[in-house]
Image: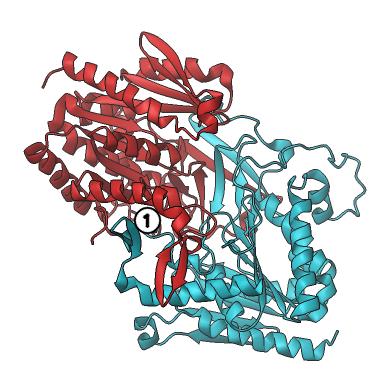
Chain colours: A red, B cyan
Amino acid sequence: MSPIHQVQFHTSFPDTSAAIDRRIPEFAPAHISDEDKYFRNHEPPAYLPEIEKEIEQFIQFHKENTNRRIVLVTSGGTTVPLENNTVRFIDNFSAGTRGATSAEYFLENGYAVIFLHREYSLLPYSRHYSHSTNCFLDFMTENNGKIEINSKYTEEMLLVLRKYNQAQANNTLLLIPFTTVNQYLYTLKSAAEKMHVLGSTALFYLAAAVSDFFIPKSRLSEHKIQSSATVDGQLQINLSQVPKFLSRLVDNWAQGAMFVSFKLETDSNILIQKATTALERYHHQLVIGNLLQTRKNEVVFVTPNDSHWIKLTEDEIKDHIEIESRMIPEVIKHHSEWITQHPN
Amino acid sequence: MSPIHQVQFHTSFPDTSAAIDRRIPEFAPAHISDEDKYFRNHEPPAYLPEIEKEIEQFIQFHKENTNRRIVLVTSGGTTVPLENNTVRFIDNFSAGTRGATSAEYFLENGYAVIFLHREYSLLPYSRHYSHSTNCFLDFMTENNGKIEINSKYTEEMLLVLRKYNQAQANNTLLLIPFTTVNQYLYTLKSAAEKMHVLGSTALFYLAAAVSDFFIPKSRLSEHKIQSSATVDGQLQINLSQVPKFLSRLVDNWAQGAMFVSFKLETDSNILIQKATTALERYHHQLVIGNLLQTRKNEVVFVTPNDSHWIKLTEDEIKDHIEIESRMIPEVIKHHSEWITQHPN
């Protein structure tokens, strides 16, 4: 049996986008945007054409055969290498729980899912058995030279396995990995441009924790930074802001689709205001706000007109209800309205 | 069946060592070392007493019942939080392959292993089935409402499962997690102090990729760093050097044991020289040097008198021989000599 369609290469290391030969000259005209400068100054990952082909085939398959709506779910944190031969990097806290869980509920609700995820972060279905103490081995027992799944786990595991096999049989889940913020940005751009043909039936659910700051290639140390590079025992790292690509995504790459972004904060006093500012700045449809401390039990949906909380009750938390089982039907309702208002 | 003894809590988030109430005063006398200052200025993780008890029991069990040598293997990268409510952190590139693989060969060679590892990094035995595309689910098929392991995987999996069960039955593997560099340092210190009673039969195999730089708690931003905190769109991060604890480990915490440290570089020109410098500085017994690019196929053993390479042949690489199967018997030979020279 072949696995869920997974593009087969490793993004973790090395970042094959190392070469810089399209640098924008110093005399670049001022009207070139930060986003364009970014793409001119940073090489795409070498494997990008392969990914583009996969995505194109996936979209084509569903356009021709199933007419399913397609959602691009981004998940997990991006890394920012501090060295070209990367030993150290800045990372964003994210196991990928939100993205992987949400993807399952999109699948259950009839969507086809392009799952753009941090390599080795949680994946739909397998998430139930990974990132645990001993993935795999604790569930198995040897019996007469055969391996059996311990009967006490069988019932729950069968439910997961069936859904996984169904996604496989229906070709509804495409797994695309990234590691660095550069890989993420290039892949998102390519995927969005391919999804453009879907018009308003395309949905972007941007749950990945994307770095706000990075070190441009031109300033990147070639080898591992040595302790001797410090001044008075201090090492200073200067980070530039990652250009804000959301407006480019909304206005150009996949114009006409619906976009959901996330806002994660640790300070509850600024959450809704920051979500509202994002909506104003990028002109998209929905920001889901959440606090690091309570993100598994409550989120706030912020639209241009409204904000309302979805909160699990004490009983629901005790029963291990996943908040994504409440969120995704709500997101889909918004998407249906969007499609009605913007027929292709 | 209970899993391999794993201390049951999560280190990933939050770092419960957040409070700072033992800060060293500004007028601290000059004779206090950087290491002591570190421990005075940073709180231990709240769970440390629990870990200390586990380690003590493990050591006691083997002293009384098995007389096995005990090795502490450290594995995976430590993180350095950039915020107190951690959204962003600096990480070191390490999946934990070296540590997890080495631990298996120590177990096969009769050692009991304390496996001090980055939470969610690779673990002995389960490593064979984790960090893959779809841990678990791709190995299983449903048959008459039961779950079976696909027969083509059974043979190899049985070998792993038996070794795993044996380590469990013999109580030879203790898993201790960490995430931040602060958790790592405190846990290493505690473990070493407990292992002191073992004298020269204790071995330290320090394969973890420990941060060289960190942000002291006193300078740590409480909440997620906002883009607005930048100056001209640049964010400056000032890192201090993590004090070098190896000399403290060698000279005090576990004096009399044998110590193996690792040196990972990306520049081959400085590797052996850096290994030699480390030996001179910390007065320990063995540095294993490796280059990021070739670390799975060759390493160099550097002792005060000698350096020699262990390299896999082309055929061995093709046959998926793990270099740790060559390294560990060699390390054990050094340890045996050490014990002979330093009888307890």
Q: How many marks?
A: 1
The chain letter under disc 1 is A
Residue type, numbered disc 1 = Asp
> Farthest residue toward the front?
B144
Q: Image point 67% across, 83% down: which residue?
A: B303
Q: Is residue B235 above or below residue B261?
A: above
> Farthest residue toward the left?
A64
Residue B242 lies in quadrant: bottom right
Q: Is residue A264 above or below residue B30?
A: above
**SS of the residue under disc 1:** loop
Between A215 and A321, which is closer to the camera in this rendering?
A321
Q: Is residue A146 above or below residue A224?
A: below
Residue B50, how many percent across, how many down?
76, 53
**A202 relative to B90 in the view: left or right:** left
Between B136 and A268, which is closer to the camera in this rendering?
B136
Residue B256, how many percent across, how many down?
82, 77
Between B39 and B31, which is closer to the camera in this rendering?
B39
Residue linked to disc 1: A15
Residue B278, how many percent across, how many down?
69, 72
**A334 relative to A81 in the view: left or right:** left
Residue B277 lies in quadrant: bottom right
Q: Residues within 10 Å of mark 1 (few under 14, many from 20)?
A: many
Residue A11, how many percent across, how many down?
35, 55
Q: Image point 54% across, 18% down: which residue?
A: A270
Q: Quadrant of the N terminus of chain B?
A: bottom right
Q: Image point 36% across, 73% down: which residue?
A: B154
Can residue A280 be seen at all in this image of the molecule?
yes
Q: Image point 78% across, 91% down: which residue?
A: B340
Can residue B189 be seen at all in this image of the molecule?
no
**A165 relative to B324 in the view: left or right:** left
